[in-house]
Amino acid sequence: MNLIGKRYECERCAAEVLCTRQGEGSLACCGAPMRVKAAKPLPASD
């Protein structure tokens, strides 16, 4: 299942996709499934 608001990236060509609608199935690019991109840590507000 695709998760709304998550970014997916291709490990082969570095393409990125932002999921805007949740649904069944999986995303694929270059013949391989795409993985959820890890979120970057936010800077401290101190």
Image (cartoon, rainbow, N blue to C red):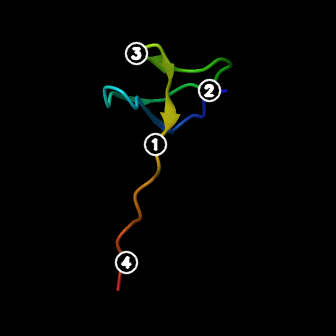
Sequence order check: which comes first, mark 1 or mark 4? 1
Q: Count residues near mark 4 (Cα–Cα under 10 Å), then give few for <14, some for 14-19, many for 20+.
A: few
Of marks 1 and 4, the one in the foreground? 1
Circle 4 or circle 3, nearest the eye: 3
Mark 3 or 2: the one toward you: 3
Whether residue 11 sits left or right of residue 34 in the image: it is left
SS for dot 1: loop
- Would you name the residue on which mark 1 appears? 37
Residue under pointer 3:
30
Q: CA distance from mark 3 to mark 1?
A: 17 Å
Question: Earlier along the polypeptide chain: callout 4 or callout 3?
Answer: 3
User: Marks 4 and 2, Cα distance to the nearest angstrom?
Assistant: 31 Å
- Say which residue label 2 marks: 22
Q: Element at badge 2?
A: loop
- Amino acid type assigned to the residue bearing label 3 in the image: Cys
Residue type, label 1: Lys
> In the rendered structure, which amino acid carries the disc numbered 2?
Gln
Q: Mark 1 or mark 2, which is nearer to you?
A: 1
